[in-house]
Image (spheres, rainbow, N blue to C red):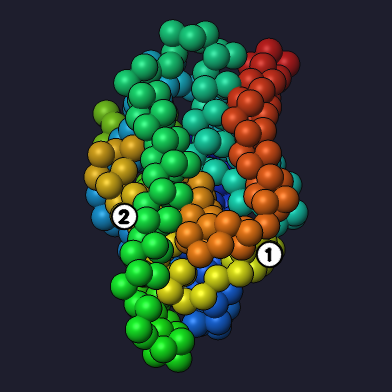
Amino acid sequence: MDWHLLLVLALVLGAEFVNGWTDAPNAIATVVSTRVMTPRAAVVLATFFNMLGTLCGTAVAETIGKGIVDLASMNPDIIIATMISIILWSCVTVHFGIPTSKSHELVAGMSGAALAVAGPSALVAAGWVKVFWGLILSSFFGFVISFIMAKCIIAGCREITPCTAKFVFGKLQIVSSMLMALNHGMNDGQKFIGIFSMTLVVANVLPHFYVPLWVILLCAFTMGAGTMVGGWKIIKNVGMRMVDIRPWQGFAAETSASGVIFGASLGGIPLSTTHTITTAIMGVAAAKNIRGVRWNIVGNIVLAWVITFPLCAVLSFLITLVLTHLI
């Protein structure tokens, strides 16, 4: 295994670490903000269930590894440029506490880099259909399903005292946080597993695309290490500044988001877990009172989401040109 391949794999693991650092906090933002769990306990929970989630199937890994960019067009420079763009943009956004989509960073980065090398023919249309559906599921269904679920809880629990509701939904929210972390690993964790395996195929280490168990375990531990770092600014921004929520709302948001992510993962759809849980939190807050959402903060978050795709695509495009023509 030469130094060039080791560099590429190290960058993939670096991006997976950043994934755990910046994306996993979304899974525990509500359980921390409602004070059902302490921040440290919530991080430990997220770390364990994120790692466990990466072991639950490889459908998303296969979509990312061979369904977005044609394997015949892939080379190490494309992967290097993609990982650098992800790491750079993620570090900028986490500094400001803004949750962004690793899915969109990854897909945009791969596409921009592939376009620099092979042009539009390098893109796989079927994979882009899944990306489109992932965008719809995360941005629309996350909000709508959580809004409906919150309305049902409001209607069905009118006779329950606030003290009882806090106790019951506090316990339920611990379970829903586990599910959210598990499904985050099942979808987001799988993406970089797919990239790692694809890198081994490009380097002729693997004869064809498949996901070895040791790759899953290595990426799982790397993402787990990133999760342990925390991402406290994102937790504060999403779970505390954007909305003020109670345990029943946290339970509704996490359960709704988990269901959407689980369905997407079964279909191999690489959706944005960040968009899903963030819009779900907006949905449960709006179900109680539309003014309960601080829309100025939402505006900043959405602006970062809009910028993510073109910025990562252009950044990886330019990095690839540099790697290809100047080095």
Crowding at label 2, few (<14), some or many (≥20) Cα neighbours within 10 Å?
A: some
The residue drawn where x is 46% and y is 69% is: 249
Tag 1 secondary structure: helix
Q: Which residue is mark 1?
A: 241
Nearer to the camera, 193 or 269:
269
Amino acid type of disc 2?
Gly
Q: Which numbered disc, 2 or 1, marks the residue that appears first in the sequence?
A: 1
How many marks the image carries: the answer is: 2
Q: Is 54 left, or right, of 73 in this rendering?
A: left
Q: Nearer the viewer, residue 327 or 67?
A: 67
From the top left corner, tell me how far across and down residue 18 is, in percent: 58, 52
> Which image quadrant: the N terminus?
top left
Q: Which residue is mark 2?
A: 259
Instruction: Work out whether residue 164 can be spotted.
Output: yes
Q: Position of residue 269 (x, y in %)?
A: 34, 37
Q: Secondary structure at mark 2?
A: helix
Q: To which quarter of the image does residue 252 belong?
A: bottom left
The residue at the far bottom in this view is 163
Q: Quadrant of the C terminus?
A: top right
Q: Is residue 225 left or right of residue 61?
A: right
Looking at the picture, which amino acid does disc 1 mark? Arg
Please tell me which residue is depicted at 39% across the width and 62% down the height of the picture. 151
